[in-house]
Amino acid sequence: MTDARVDTLLEIDGLTKRFGGVIASDAISLGVRKGELHAIIGPNGAGKTTLIGQLAGEIAPDAGRISFEGGDVTTLPTYRRSQIGLARSFQITSLFLDFTALDNVALAVQAHAGHSFHFWRSARGEADLRVPARAALARVGLAERSDVLVSNLSHGEHRQLEIAMALATTPRMLLLDEPMAGMGPEESARMVKTLRELKRELTILLIEHDMEAVFALADRITVLVYGRIIASGSPEAIRANAEVRQAYLGEQEQAHG
Amino acid sequence: MIALLTPRNVVVAFLLLLLAAVPIYAAWTGNAFLVTLFTRIIILGMAATTLNLILGYGGMVSFGHAVYLGIGGYAVGILAYEGVTTGFVQWPLAILVSALFALIVGALSLRTRGVYFIMITLAFAQLLYYFGVGLDRYGADDGLSIRQRSQFAGLINLSDRTLFYYLCLALLLVTIYLTWRLVNSRFGMVIQGSRSNDRRMRAIGFPTFRYRLTAFVIAGAICGLAGALLANHTGFISPATMHWTRSGDLIVMVVLGGMASSFGPLIGALVLLSLEEALPIVIRAAASPLFGDAAVRIAEYWQIVLGPLFLLVVLFARGGIDGLLAGARRD
């Protein structure tokens, strides 16, 4: 083992995924170091969500290897990956709409509190589930909204709840799929603040379209275009990279005026 | 926490009083048919309650749930025919075989979703239906008469119709209570979460399949017991009990009464079976001044009234009758 590998938490090696004729992941190799916030950017259709899907175990890669904390997880089912500390949030809000915010997070706590073959005691009365759930809600600023049905929460609050649920699984690493999608500037600012606090304790792989947020938060940035990595490095290096500017950032700057 | 005198609680309390009073009222008026009708309502209400566990709470639309009524019924019928009349063997076997069948059906069907799941549960139920039709030794298509009700070594005499009625009522209430405990436990949270968003459940670390399968088996097992009760009640079992239209009736009871509600399926069973009895009489009475003797023939089309009623509930009361009572609780 080399020194560089020792503090690599997530190692992706030659990951490839094809959908018919489209290559969504083209031999992606990437290491996420312990404690860093690693952002993946790229234009729409670059294969970012497909990559997260493979990391979370929802999409099986055609080739390549994923290891987490040195162990091969390439073929591990989704729920097992969550159990060993790889938590994801969803780009399109994916919550339990007919439950309250607290119920949602308590379910995430329960998922990591042993098996759930408990048939008798009321789960809503269990402090073991409710206390950590309330704590996770408080961390994302949703403490006041814990008893509101999720279908009655705002979009921004849904995004925060997504993070709270990922946190409640006591992960070692967060896979965040566009946590700021569809957010207004105020909500985005609050999310950046939340993520900045989280990155002190957790390793985060962040997919995000909001460039301002990415450059404010990321330790390293990887740029994905048509399923292929075209650059990877510090925010400064990425900003200065000509290929990236042409392929991606240039378009963005033009689009934003 | 919540006020006790909600419309829903009042209706449920009234319903329980009504059920408790049926044999007394029947004895007073000499109307034995009432006990027969309400025993049936209670047994099918119990079957619908078990379906509600998987359909209402678990989101698993099983279109073959009546098959467990048949399995439970045949367990009693076949054993009685072969000379084993003790309920201590008949009833556990009814539960066990139902659980086993549910395990097989569930293991194969729960890997699919939506229409495929409905079709597989339907196919398995029809498979057993035709198996029953082919059981020449046990009456095949015509069914099997059960001459003697299950014997419990003199502890309880099921031939006493009043006693049998109260036994069924007690088992129904136990089923409702167990279901209520179950759906609010950790286990219940998992199957409800899985109904709501199974993909997310797996993403936060739940192997949902084994929990859903367990719920499927529990529902099948208890419905098998309801089947044993039903066979004792009618003194008869035939493949028709397992026909897919019977499974459809159970779904109607759950949806009509209110999915994911404790007393909804019982309310649904009560309303559906009462309407089945009452509608022909009401229609005949209403039509006879206009059509005279033809009113009897018109009354045969009572389902024309039942259908739109069901449609109205589905369209305007998403939570069924129970949902109406509780106010806009869901959505």
Image (tube, coloured by chain):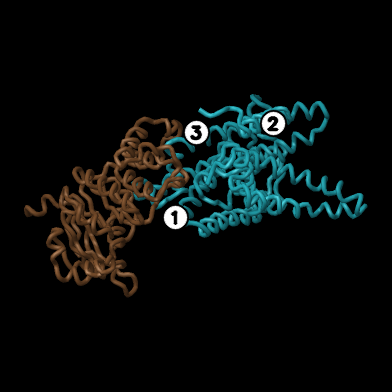
Chain colours: A brown, B cyan
The amino acid beneath tag 1 is Arg
- Whether A213 is drawn above or below A99: the answer is below
The amino acid beneath tag 2 is Leu
Residue depicted at x 61% and y 28%: B5
Quick check: A244 left or right of B253? left
User: Mark 1 to mark 3: distance in Å?
Assistant: 26 Å
Chain for disc number 1: B
Residue under pointer 3: B181
Residue under pointer 1: B111
Chain for disc number 3: B
Q: Quadrant of residue A54?
A: bottom left
Which residue, as the protein is rendered here, is positioned at the far front? Answer: A257
Q: Nearer the viewer, residue B269 or A88?
A: A88
Q: Quadrant of residue B187?
A: top left
Quick check: A82 left or right of B165? left
Residue under pointer 2: B19
Question: SS of the residue at dot 1?
Answer: loop
Which residue, as the protein is rendered here, is positioned at the far left? Answer: A3
- Whether A182 is drawn above or below B166: the answer is below
